[in-house]
């Protein structure tokens, strides 16, 4: 049946309850197809991520169709998360296709008891399921929607200390300039609110360190910081001895903030002190 005849049958069917016309149109109508295309990540942070699944709805018929209803659910590691839907009434052109995007807001605290444990995974499993209802002249046609896959889990950045520079030295204490390198281990951008905690030299607590707002780390990117720290020899004699010897173990114990999540982080390095 050619395009004109199919369109004419659809018009007549809309104004008639004729069984013959309905059967005629049903035989000429070709079922649309729904295919999964890809998954993309957005608004990534250590607290959560937006997971977008992309689908293609193809219409092989010579008349346009519209989206009448959507039933969509997304599960991450077996737990259902909040998912959005494309608007009803979306038009699929004749002999054309439309892209459908389903966004889902994944909060890691809803997936795992400890967010920092979840962030040690390389990937997380997800499952999409549901159906689409396409409005046609013969009624709503339901197309099943189903796909399983995995997505990259955001990871804590790698933090490394450089050799501290002694900027000022007196009998009472010293001021150090502490180089800090923050490197992303993700393929996507990740916002870092800041890094704060206590710093120790040779086991002696010398004070608190805070980077302030680090900003957005690009995928696999690096941010260089240089932080001042004051050492009081009266309260940190072991640190004074390490500075006199020219090297010692520098330790940090604190937390990293990203997207509202506070993740414990600690590291220790043996470093040389330079003038």
Image (cartoon, rainbow, N blue to C red):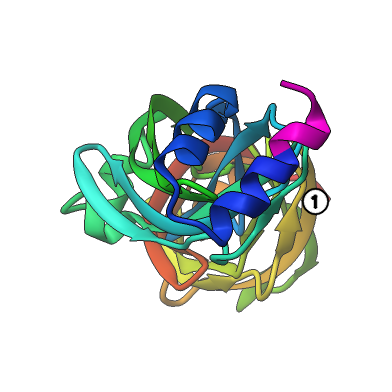
In this rendering, would 190 be left or right of 142? right
Q: Is residue 233 above or below residue 238?
A: below
Of residues 74 and 98, which is closer to you in this image?
98
Q: Is residue 48 left or right of residue 243?
A: left
Specify whether residue 243 is in view. Answer: no
Relative side of 219 to 80, left or right:
right
Residue 45 rendering spot, x and y as whole percentages: 54, 57
Query: Between residues 116 and 163, which one lies in front from this camera angle?
Result: 116
Front residue of 267 and 169: 267
Q: Residue at x 77, y 39 (%)?
A: 94
Q: Within the magenta stretch, is there residue 2?
A: yes
User: Taking the image as drawn, is residue 228 in sight?
Assistant: yes
Query: Which residue is rendered at x = 54% and y = 65% of the image?
Result: 88
Q: How many marks?
A: 1
Q: Quadrant of residue 168?
A: bottom right
Q: Residue 25 placed where, x, y %? A: 55, 34
| Residue depicted at x 60% and y 70% | 193
Where residue 166 appears, as percent x and y from the top left, is: 76, 58
Name the secondary structure under disc 1: strand
Q: Is residue 199 magenta?
A: no
Task: Tell me which segment is drawn in magenta.
Answer: 1-6
- Provide the residue designation for mark 1: 224
Q: Nearer the viewer, residue 159 or 168?
A: 159
Q: Main secondary structure of the magenta part?
A: helix
Quarter location, residue 109: bottom left
- Which residue shows up at 46% across the image and 63% down it? 84
In the image, residue 86 above or below residue 60: below
């Amino acid at each position: 049946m050619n395009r004109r005849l199919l369109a004419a049958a659809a018009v007549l069917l809309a104004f008639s309850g004729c069984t013959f016309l309905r059967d005629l149109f049903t035989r000429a109508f070709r079922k649309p197809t729904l295919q999964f295309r890809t998954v993309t990540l957005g608004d990534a942070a250590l607290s959560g991520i937006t997971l977008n699944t992309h689908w293609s709805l193809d219409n092989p018929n010579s008349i346009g169709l519209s989206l009448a209803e959507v039933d969509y659910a997304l599960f991450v590691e077996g737990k259902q998360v909040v998912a959005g839907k494309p608007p009803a009434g979306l038009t699929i052109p004749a002999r054309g296709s439309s892209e459908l995007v389903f966004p889902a807001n994944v909060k890691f605290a809803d997936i795992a008891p400890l967010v920092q444990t979840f962030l040690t995974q390389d990937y997380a499993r997800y499952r999409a399921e549901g159906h689409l209802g396409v409005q046609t002249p013969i009624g709503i046609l339901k197309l099943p929607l189903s796909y399983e896959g995995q997505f990259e889990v955001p990871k804590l950045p790698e933090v490394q200390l450089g050799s501290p520079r002694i900027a000022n030295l007196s009998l009472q204490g010293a001021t150090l300039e502490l180089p800090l390198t923050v490197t992303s281990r993700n393929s996507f951008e990740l916002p870092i609110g800041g890094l704060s905690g206590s710093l120790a030299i040779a086991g002696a607590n010398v004070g608190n360190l805070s980077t302030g707002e680090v900003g957005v780390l690009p995928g696999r990117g690096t941010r260089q910081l240089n932080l001042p720290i004051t050492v009081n020899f009266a309260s940190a004699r072991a640190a004074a001895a390490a500075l006199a010897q020219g090297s010692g173990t520098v330790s940090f114990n604190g937390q990293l903030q990203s997207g509202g999540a506070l993740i414990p982080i600690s590291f220790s390095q043996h470093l040389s002190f330079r003038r």
